[in-house]
Image (spheres, grey):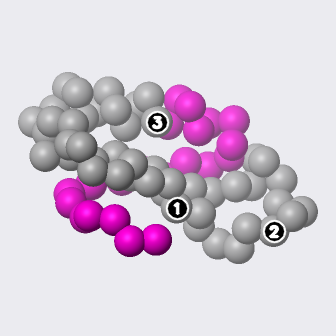
Amino acid sequence: KDFPGGLYAVTRCKGLHTLGDTWHQLCTWRHNGKYKRARHQWLEGHIGPVLKETKDEDLVLDLYTPIA
């Protein structure tokens, strides 16, 4: 997939049960820091193989929030 790039802040999420809290922490960091929210694509990247038998607690994602 092609999309316009830009600057991102990234954090890692371990376990599907932490996904919402990790996004919240990343956005709070951005809101309280020197960066502003940018308008380019938000992203989640799977780390390692994604297999049908991967348990939710073993899933690892990198979360990307656009910043300016």
Check disc 3 and give the amino acid type.
Trp
The residue at the point 44 percent across, 54 percent down is: 43
Q: Earlier in the sequence, mark 2 or mark 1?
A: 1
Height in image: 34 above or below 64? above
Answer whether residue 9 is visible to the viewer in this image.
Answer: no
The residue at the point 71 percent across, 73 percent down is: 49
52 or 17, nearer to the observer: 52
32 or 68, nearer to the observer: 68
Residue 26 at x, y percent in the picture: 37, 37
Q: Earlier in the sequence, mark 3 or mark 1?
A: 3
Q: Which mark is residue 51?
A: 2
Height in image: 28 above or below 1? above
Residue behind mark 3? 23
Check disc 1 and give the amino acid type.
Gly
Decide if residue 36 is on the left or right side of residue 53.
left
- Density class for disc 1 (Cα within 10 Å; few <14, some 14-19, many ≥20) is few
Tell me, yes or no, whether the highlighted magenta stretch contains residue 12: yes
Residue behind mark 1? 45
